[in-house]
Image: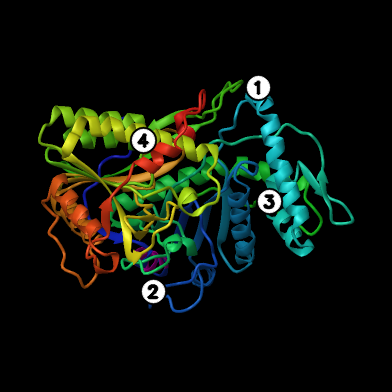
Amino acid sequence: MDKDAFPTRPLDDVTPLITAGEGYPALERLALNAEYYLWLAFRIFDPETQLYSAASGTGTWRDLLERKIAQGVAVRLLISDFDPIGAPKLHETTWRSVEHLRGLANRGDFQVLPVRHEAQVGKGLRFGLWLMAARAIESQRKELNDARPEESSTIFQTRPGLWRHLKQDKNGTFKWRSLLLPRLFPATLHHKVAVADGTAAIIGGLDVDTRRYDDLNHDRPAEETWHDATVRVDGPIAGDIAHYVAQTWNANRIRMAAIRREQLRYAPDGVAERELQVAPLELPQPSTASAERGGIRLIRTLSKQARRTGFQLSPKEHLREIEEAHIQLFSNAKRRVYIETQYFRSKAIADALATAAKNTPELSLILILPAAPEEIAFGDVPHVSDKMGEQLQTECLERVAGAFGNRMTVLSPVRPKPRSTDGRDNLHGAEIIYVHSKIAIADDNDAIIGSANLNGRSMRWDTEAAVRIEDRDVVTNLCTRVFEAWHVAGRQAPDLLMADASHWHKIAQRTAQELPEERGFFLVPYSEEPARRLGQSIPLVPDELV
């Protein structure tokens, strides 16, 4: 085992949480029960997200955090920041959250740290990409000038990464400040974890945001559905998660404070010049408990800034524990592999599954995917990156299908509500359910759940966190909860606990032939043809970009 790896811990308690309908109340209870500290580390954290548990009462997450601070609990929020040129809306979302929470520091022990991944595109390559970046900045300038004056000022104030490139004159018009070479950031912090007192934690794929809320009924319009999964874990593993959050905080706080000071040199009028005041977190003392057999382990993807960037686009890979754990899980599987993932674009993962299929003739694969990526299903015109992602997924599915043959089925969830359009927001005559969960289960004794999709970005570039669980009782319970989520409430449910891919496929095919409103199962066969038609290879662009 790598010297940086966390050890396998004995299992205490693991509670599966399917959809935000279960995940959000559990996260609120975790926060409510914190006595000493509450550490949150999310890709997206909107403090205006409403509370859902009876114990929390009414209000928002900001209200809940304010209550805990008043009780003397030390609260730390690590929230991802994004490339201000390549992802301006996400960059703005982060800083709106930061500004909305800023006043809490005056109420007690609270600090928030927005973190942009340290890796940058090399200077030489940035010269080559300058025109493309300049067009993206110009697009933002036009957006600001087209907005209402009061709205444009607010948008600009919450895009601090744009300040060194644009300025607002006395008439309110946005102009170029300078032609400084734009900095580009190809990776992000993608983890979603919360830990209370180092004794209990929640980890998985779910961020805190109104868009992410859905429940097991999926009784919402297609564009508002969101199928996700997390787990609550107790015991020594929670201490490891706390250690991970503290490490991430400490590794980024000085760099981000320096970035903020630079931003403030170009700050527009109306921005209170607040520097980031963040103290280091004390690393929790690691537990000495170690599992002799089975157990649970924290696994990560970590990358860093390359020393010599030059024409480097990608960050330097540091830890690929999540990819390695998936490959090992597939290799050990004897009977069935079950996967839920937002994207299936990693050639390394596809090759590992294909190898497992050839080495184990009895092995079957059940793969759950959204009918289409969110940007394509509910967006306007697909971007070039969307087309590249569809091409990669088509290639990966073909590799795996070639090895498994009829021992594999690929399924997608749809609502029991009819819709038939030319778009990708429907499948087999029904509205789609968007899949965001990241789960892999081998047989009924080995599982991975966390923030990482099965694409090169999650396996190699972004910062990701997951847990691997090796225990028959715990994984069987996880299977039961995960599989039950695909049954429409009040309808007759098929027994899937021991079923192989062919049985899942037969049920899904039969479901697709029924009228949507009469279906008792959410899953139908996935259609590869739309992705194949849209897909496009992009020469010289690394697969990990999408």
Please give the label number shown on residue 394: 4
Whole-angstrom CA distance, mark 2 to mark 1, is 51 Å
Q: Position of residue 124 (x, y in %)?
A: 65, 22
Which residue is at the far right?
A: 170
Camera-nearest residue between 504 and 363: 504
Which dot, 2 or 3, sits closer to the camera? Answer: 3
Q: Which amino acid lies under the numbered mark 1 shown in the image of this protein? A: Gly
- Residue 73 at least partly seen: yes
Which dot, 3 or 4, sits closer to the camera? Answer: 4
Q: Which amino acid lies under the numbered mark 3 shown in the image of this protein? A: Arg
Magenta-colored span: 22-31
Quadrant of the image containing the N terminus: top left
Please give the label number shown on residue 124: 1
Whole-angstrom CA distance, mark 2 to mark 4, is 41 Å
Please give the label number shown on residue 159: 3
Disc 1, SS? helix
Q: Which amino acid lies under the numbered mark 2 shown in the image of this protein? A: Ser
Q: Is residue 534 left or right of residue 506?
A: right
Residue annotated with mark 2: 53
Which dot, 2 or 4, sits closer to the camera? Answer: 4
Vertical arrangement, residue 226 with respect to residue 535, above or below:
below
The residue under the point 21% across, 52% down is 11
**Is residue 26 rendered magenta in the image?**
yes
The residue under the point 48% across, 38% down is 387
Whole-angstrom CA distance, mark 3 to mark 4, is 36 Å
Earlier residue among tags 3 and 1? 1
**Is residue 172 rendered magenta in the image?**
no
